[in-house]
Amino acid sequence: MDIGDENPSIYKVCRTIKRMDQSLYNALRSIYRDSLFVAEIRRLWPDLPLVANLRCGLWYSSHFDATCYFKSTDGHAGNWSFNPTRLNIHVATIAVEKGGCIIVDATRKGKRFPDSMSKTIPIWTCVLNRAIQAFHRDKLMRRSDELCALSCKSCNGEDCQLQGKNFADSGPEVNSCLCRKALVDISAEDWDCSLHLPLWVSETEKANMESRIEGWIKILKDTGTDFTFLARSLQKPLRPLWISQKSVVWLNEVPDLDAWNFTPIILVSASSASESTLRMSDNEFSWSYIPGAADDEESWARGLSPILFWKHSYNLINDGPAVCTRMVADIVEKDRVYRTQRGQDASQIRVKPKKVSANINDILEEGFISEFQYGIDTGDGFNLVERNRKSDENVIHSSSERHFNLYWIGTTKLAIGTSQYGQIGGASDQVESIINCDPVSGFIPCTGEDAYIHLPILSSKFDRCALQNSLPSAVAFARKKLVKGETLLVCCSNGEDVSVCVCLAILMSLFNDKGVFDDGRSLKSATVSKWDVKRRLVYICNFASIARPSRGNLRQVFNFLIRNNFEFDI
């Protein structure tokens, strides 16, 4: 092997081989192979919606019904967490509607499941189950107290206690206080609230997580999240199940969903847990399998997005490694030109070449992974989901085709969306004014310039003060429109970060805790804390399931609200 040196070191040889194994073609071929396993699992439960855990899981199927966002860092040993800003309530709602759901994710070699599936999601199901149980218990207790008050009008407390009977022997006419308390206890016991973890999680780690659950439930309650619909609709408690490529699933003995006494959250780890590189071949090409190939897409995808991959997957896979890199570059560039011609977000990707010799470049012509520098944070790695009301299906749209619905924030007359929707999605028919935060796409809506303001706000990754500096103008514009009772759309390039933060600042500045416009009186009479901002963010997330604001942008919102530079830790 010629690598440019007469006496190459072992380190250089290993690095060269690793780069060849981690080539773009190998990554895409590995993703395609793992997607066949995901498709096989989906065929076992065709009625269950398929949900991608952003961002890695989004690559493993050409069609997802929804997306979710469970972070592995919330499940790392010693760092277990239940983050109220990532409630994913829409996932529980989907599971209620369809009797369960299938969540897809993947992880690098050496592990069967990512920590997001091993611990983050089990914690999430346990906390939700206990919150719903507490909701039902409180409801039963209130009803019991009301009946006790009626039955005790003609007797004192001691006489009422003496009337107690065994609940099993009581008839419908029994109005004993003790019987009603027993009914509450029995109803609570029927609801499984255990922390269900996979077998490879140690008992010590499980005990440490269980000791924190009550605190997480308190955090959830303090956010003010409304569980009424979920509690009334969920007939069976949520419970995770784990399936990987090493799982044994008997095709002729797949249990019926109705046979389970719980609502299944089926966690599918798409990648194989191989400790070493697997060499594979077909009729034409030889390639190396990469476990969890879709992880950390910025380091290998060269600007390719999941939707573009599946649109051109046949040619990318079947034309072989020799032309794969050039095909991807051509696909990405054509998509960029397509969006540019339509005034959409289309930042150009500039490749930063590695310092390698000419001979190594020849060897690794198709093999090494380039480093990318984005001129602007476009969020192309995230493909969002639109609810299609006519077909009752969720469809993932590409950046060049997606026309998003508006996410109305309760009764506030505020909506969150993308700049693409504001420009070509008929937003003028639904909103009367627009705040456009897209740093690239500026447009004049049909409603006229007076009903529109363009604030080109860069992500905190590129400008640490851009959002904070623009918030006074955004809030002032919103106040002028909301005083008149107009509806207002806040949009950005992806509808999930900057627009959410601007909407959060408007809510905190001009609305009270109940979501009623008060022209800032509540803010003037209160001291804003981190928890206040987090509560209001949870309120937004209840309506806009795609909301995923960055920590840097949230910090700028907090600084704007308090006019000081305190650390904001979400």
Image: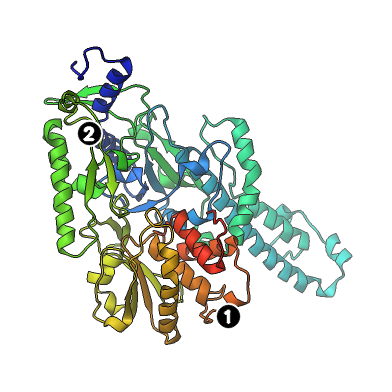
Callout 1 crowding tier (Cα within 10 Å): few <14, some 14–19, many ≥20: few
Q: Which amino acid type is shown beneath numbered disc 1?
A: Arg
Residue at image point 42% right, 46% down: 257
Q: Position of residue 32 (x, y in %)?
A: 24, 37
| Marks 1 and 2, the one that precedes in the sequence | 2
Identify the residue at the far bottom of this view. 484
Q: Is residue 296 above or below residue 19?
A: below
Q: Which amino acid type is shown beneath numbered disc 2?
A: Arg
Give the quarter of the figure containing the N terminus.
top left
Image quadrant of residue 361? top left
Rendered image coloring scheme: rainbow
Residue at image point 51% right, 74% down: 509
Tell me the residue that label 2 is attached to: 29
Which of these two is toward me, 427 or 192? 427
Tell me the residue that label 1 is attached to: 521
Q: Position of residue 188 (x, y in %)?
A: 64, 53
One can see residue 567 in this view: yes
Q: Position of residue 5 (x, y in %)?
A: 22, 17
C-alpha distance separating marks 1 and 2: 58 Å
**Element carrying mark 1:** helix
Callout 2 crowding tier (Cα within 10 Å): few <14, some 14–19, many ≥20: many
Image quadrant of residue 460? bottom left
Answer left or right for 80 relative to 398: right
One can see residue 225 in this view: no
Q: Which mark is residue 319?
A: none
Residue at image point 40% right, 43% down: 256
Q: Is residue 17 above or below residue 208?
A: above
Residue at image point 34% right, 36% down: 270
Q: Mark 1 or 2, which is nearer the eye? A: 1
Q: Position of residue 435 (x, y in %)?
A: 35, 73
